[in-house]
Amino acid sequence: MSVVAGLRGFRPWPRTLGSRLFLILLAGLMLAQGLTFSVQSLERYITAKAVMLNTLENDVATSIAVLDRLPAAERADWLDRLDRGTYRFVLGPGLPGVPSLTDQGKQIAGKIQDAVGERFPIRFESIPGDGKRLQAHLTLSDGNPLTIDVNPAPIMPMAQWLPIVLLLQLGLLILCTWLVVRQALRPLADLANAADALDPNKKTPRLVEAGPSEVAHAARAFNAMRDRIAHYLEERVQILAAISHDLQTPITRMKLRAEIAEDSPEKEKLVQDLAEIQRLVHEGVAYARSAHGNTEKPSRIDIGSFVESLAYDYQDTGKAVMVADKVDGAIITRPHALRRILTNLIDNALKFAGTAEISVQKDSTGTVLIKVLDRGPGIPEDQLDAVMQPFFRLEQSRSRGTGGTGLGLAIAGQLAQAIGGSLALRNREGGGLSAEISLR
């Protein structure tokens, strides 16, 4: 089973589109280049072989005629002159051999036979131990034996610079393939980055509508989609604001009628229900508007003084909110949105723990980390992400004391993103919750 699992886990095919295109294009170009090189080599081999055989026939005919006319004592002096590298003339019977010849040997023997003609009887033998080497034995006019020792060399010897050229061609193919793939995938990468950074509420640059027609069309479609999303979000806020405005009047009338009614347990419950309805309407509109936190202009604030001022406001109302530690320093942010975030987190800590601590830190990169700490019951690990969703409540009893609307953390998370930060929840060692705001 382990072998099967190992084979299933083996992925020879790359997962990225760029790597796949690179391998396909490179393999295709290399195959085409190899095929071209093979066809050219075959054509050159056939041509060189034909030239070599024709040259062999002419040279052998001339050389034998010269040696036959020379006196026997002068023939040895001419042997070096007649040596051609691939064949040479030997005065004597030569080496013992066998009559069987290879196909190439038969072609060479045929050319030598044509060169000698009928004037000199000739016999061909293959030298044992070397399938290419052969000897032709004949007798000159004066009765002296003559041997033609043929040792065919490669018809197309490889030049020393050819491997270097092939390596340069391979490097050029790799470079060109990489450039083509990079040029083709760059618009796709830009589109993916734009999709990751999609936020209709931020003044991020629009995708450039240039390049090939397909790329320009995709960029225009993406920009149009972004505009539609921004328009839909704006419509959502306007609709919720209109609903909230229209509900205020009947809710107010109902509260007035309830207040002038005779005191009874039903009256108290009715007033509480109306107050909860009114709070739910306000929170719903606040959540919708939290996605548009960029309506407030950024300003420079001292983060230490800002947090201390917020804690003092709570202390003035008798709430146990303390500043555990802080750092001083100016940051540029949207103070009203940041105050709303911290207020929601502090109210949440006070609701479940009765006390809250605020900690302000700054790391080496200049990122400011604001923590709202409590010693309450915390949140189950598998629900830390779920509580950030709107209308999600751990308190399922919908108690007026602890149930809430389920929008406080969702509004805080939305506003944190709107001001260029992030909100994360973590359980503390020893119990409690840490709500951490990261501002870059």
Image (cartoon, rainbow, N blue to C red):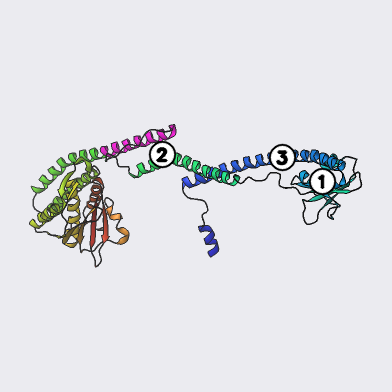
Structural distance between the alpha carbons of marks 3 and 1: 17 Å
Write the residue at 20% across / 51% down: 341
| Amino acid residing under circle 2 | Pro
409 or 100, which lies in front? 100
Indicate whether 360 appears above or below 81.
below
| Amino acid residing under circle 1 | Lys
Image position of 410 (left or right of 178): left
Q: Is residue 322 magenta?
A: no
Residue range corresponding to the magenta coloring? 211-235
Image position of 440 (left or right of 83): left
The residue under label 2 is 187
**For residue 106, which numbered disc appears in the image?**
1
Q: Position of residue 209 (x, y in %)?
A: 37, 33
Write the residue at 85% across / 54% down: 98
Tell me, yes or no, if residue 1 can be seen here: no
- Callout 1: helix, strand or loop? helix
138 or 307, which lies in front? 138
The residue under label 3 is 48
